[in-house]
């Protein structure tokens, strides 16, 4: 799965929790001549 951070709305002042939303989508398949790069994210 691929997690994306989507800009949901333009904030007025400081961004709040509803300014962004997180979506999980299927990992795309590489087509001929393309590569898919996966970057591990380590959060402490």
Image (cartoon, helix red, strand yellow):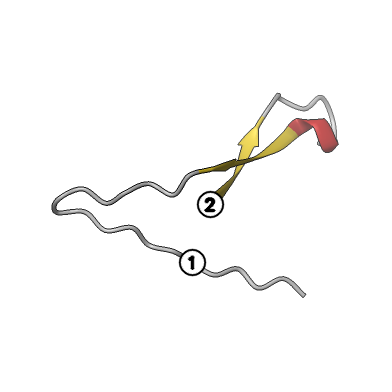
Q: Secondary structure at mark 2?
A: loop
Q: Examine the image and state in which quarter residue 41 appears.
A: bottom right
| Residue in the foreground of this view, choosing between 40 and 26 | 26
Q: In the image, is 2 to the left or to the right of 10?
A: left
Q: In the image, is 33 to the left or to the right of 4?
A: left
Above or below, 11 against 32 in this view is: above
Residue 11 is situated, as x and y percent measured from the top left of the image, at: 77, 27
Above or below, 26 against 34 in this view is: above
* Residue density around tag 2, few if under 14, some if 14–19, many if 20 or more, within 10 Å: few
Label 1 or label 2, whichever lies nearer to me, is: 2
Above or below, 17 against 32 in this view is: above
**Disc 1/disc 2 C-alpha distance (Å):** 12 Å
Q: Which mark is residue 19?
A: none
Residue 28 is situated, as x and y percent measured from the top left of the image, at: 37, 46
Kindly identify the residue that appears in the image at 54 percent across and 70 percent down: 40
Kindly identify the residue that appears in the image at 81 percent across and 31 percent down: 18
Residue 4 is situated, as x and y percent measured from the top left of the image, at: 58, 44
What residue sits right under mark 2 in the picture?
Answer: 1
Mark closer to the chain start, 1 or 2: 2
Q: Examine the image and state in which quarter residue 36 appears.
A: bottom left
Q: Which mark is residue 39?
A: 1
Q: In the image, is 4 to the left or to the right of 8?
A: left
Kindly identify the residue that appears in the image at 62 percent across and 36 percent down: 6
| Residue in the foreground of this view, choosing between 1 and 13 | 1
* Residue density around tag 1, few if under 14, some if 14–19, many if 20 or more, within 10 Å: few
Specify the quadrant that holds the C terminus: bottom right
Kindly identify the residue that appears in the image at 70 percent across and 24 percent down: 9
């Amino acid at each position: 799965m691929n997690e994306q951070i989507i800009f949901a709305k333009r904030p007025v002042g400081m961004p709040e929790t509803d300014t962004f939303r997180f979506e999980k989508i299927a990992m795309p398949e590489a087509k001929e001549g393309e590569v898919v790069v996966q970057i591990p994210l380590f959060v402490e």
